[in-house]
Image: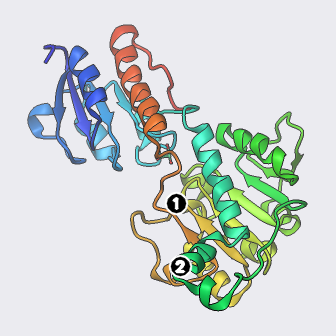
Amino acid sequence: MSGGPDAIVLGTVTDRMRARLDEKFTVHAVGTDSVPEALLGASYICCGQGGASVRADLIDAMPELKIISNFGVGYDNVDAAHAASKGVVVSHTPDVLNDEVANTAILLMLASARNFRHDEDWARSGTWEKQGAAPLSRSVKGATVGILGLGRIGEALAEKLGVFGVTVVYHNRSEKPVPYTYYGDLVEMARDADILISVAPGGASTHHIVNAEVLKALGPDGLLVNVGRGSVVDETALVAALSSGTLGAAALDVFEHEPKIPDALKTMDNVVLLPHVGSATVETRAAMGDLVVDNLIAMLETGKARTPVPE
Ligand code: DGY
């Protein structure tokens, strides 16, 4: 321990993060989202992996709090508006996961369109030997892919999609100077798209924006991919659309109430499910962990975070 100021660790941190924190802070790994009374005077909160949540009551209980350094580009686990109102900086880990999450979206798109989840079962279970070739799937070449949320990950995704022979269009809070067609109306985009990929962040402004109307517009041959936040999609409407055939298929890495996945989705053949692993590679998580610690050290040494969340 360095004897530096107290830093509260919520959730789990890697050995590398812990070693770097120990050089500058007196680290208290409390492991949960509640901070013991004796530590409420601390100024630094480090959120590790595993969904640490920092709500208004905790922020209010820590009058000296300077920074909440979040592990992840998404920060819907932190009450950032309340933190800002108290002058507490919230930082996150943008950019370092763009490639991995964009790759995950593409893999989900292909796994679903090409029916690979089903095909893998076909090969593994011996069905191939008994019944011969698996049913044909669909090509993505020529499809229109609508990206919901053209932030950093969305832009990386749009660029990568360029090699698949698809037409990329997007819906975003505002139009951007990019070579893709902009739709101000999400339903209209869903109507024109074959595949809708959501990389939108969570929070009040995106809550359930992929609703029954959007899913219906995407249509019986449409595919919904979600690698952003589960709260963007109305899961009840999604289950209804998939089971009635109003929507063709879904491929999801994120869910409304993680780690819970609606049971109905688990039984559907036209659904691919992942346990929120978009950024979960050793390399990307190490880069995210470094940035979490960099933000705390920058705050300690310069009074400013390296990557604060947008205002
Ligand atoms: C993020 O960083 O927000 C990713 O979803 C991984 O949690």
Residue that label 2 marks: 265
Which structural element holds mark 1? loop
86 or 119: nearer the eye?
119
Q: Quadrant of residue 194?
A: bottom right
Residue positioned 52% across, 76% down in the render: 124
275 or 235: nearer the eye?
275
Q: Residue furthest top?
A: 302
Pointer 2 residue Cβ closer than 8 Å to ligand 1 = no
Q: Is residue 235 above or below residue 52?
A: below
Residue that label 1 marks: 254
Q: x, y percentage for residue 99?
A: 62, 39
Callout 1: 10 Å neighbours few (<14), some, many (20+)? many
**Can the viewer see residue 192 in this picture?**
yes
Q: x, y percentage for residue 83?
A: 40, 35
Q: Is residue 50 above or below residue 127?
A: above
Q: What distance separates the C-alpha of mark 1 from that of mark 2?
A: 12 Å
Callout 2: 10 Å neighbours few (<14), some, many (20+)? some
